[in-house]
Image (cartoon, rainbow, N blue to C red):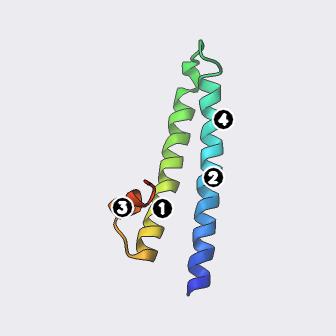
Amino acid sequence: MRVKTHQDGQLLVAAVRRAAAAHNLTWEAMVPDAFTIDLRAEAAEEQAYLAMAGEKQRLRAHICTTYGISIRELASLAMP
């Protein structure tokens, strides 16, 4: 079971990275520079952000379930 859990985690991390890259593209389309905002790109940016948030949630849930920790415990691991 451990190998599948590791593979599942790798797939979830890859999905988060893909979603973050897609969000980055839509963000840059909406805010191409510090002086410009293209509101025509707002809907695509919001959709990409929500997709990224969903992938992050799936990864967090996997980590918490796999290691039997709460989201607070997971967050505290990221801090020094």
Q: Are marks 1 and 4 in contact (CB under 8 Å)?
A: no
The spot of residue 51 in percent (x, y) is: 52, 48
The part of the image, by quadrant, that contains residue 41 is top right
Label 1 sits on a secondary structure element that is helix
Q: Which of disc 3 and disc 1 is earlier in sequence?
A: 1
Instruction: Kindly identify the amino acid type of the residue bearing the numbered disc 1.
Output: Arg
The numbered dot on residue 71 is 3
User: Which of the two labelled residues, at mark 2 and mark 4, occupies the earlier sequence position?
Assistant: 2
Q: CA distance from mark 1 to mark 3?
A: 12 Å
Q: Nearest to the eye among marks 2 and 4: give it.
A: 2
Of callouts 1 and 4, the N-terminal one: 4
User: Type of residue at label 4?
Assistant: Leu
* Circle nearer the N terminus (2, 1): 2
Q: Is residue 76 above or below residue 28?
A: below
Residue 7, relative to residue 13: is it above or below? below
Q: Secondary structure at mark 3?
A: helix
| Nearer-N-terminus badge (2/3) | 2
In this view, the mark in front (1 or 3) = 3
Badge 2: how crowded within 10 Å, few (<14), some, or many (20+)?
Answer: some
Name the residue that disc number 1 marks.
Answer: 58
- The mark lying in front, picked from 3 and 4, is 3
Tell me if label 3 and label 4 are in contact, CB under 8 Å: no
Name the residue furthest top. Answer: 35
Instruction: Answer with mark 3 or mark 4, whichever residue precedes in sequence.
Output: 4
Q: Could you say which is closer to the camera, residue 70 or residue 11? A: 70
Which residue is the site of mark 2? 17
What element does badge 4 sit on?
helix
Q: Which residue is mark 4?
A: 25
Residue 78: % across, % down = 45, 56
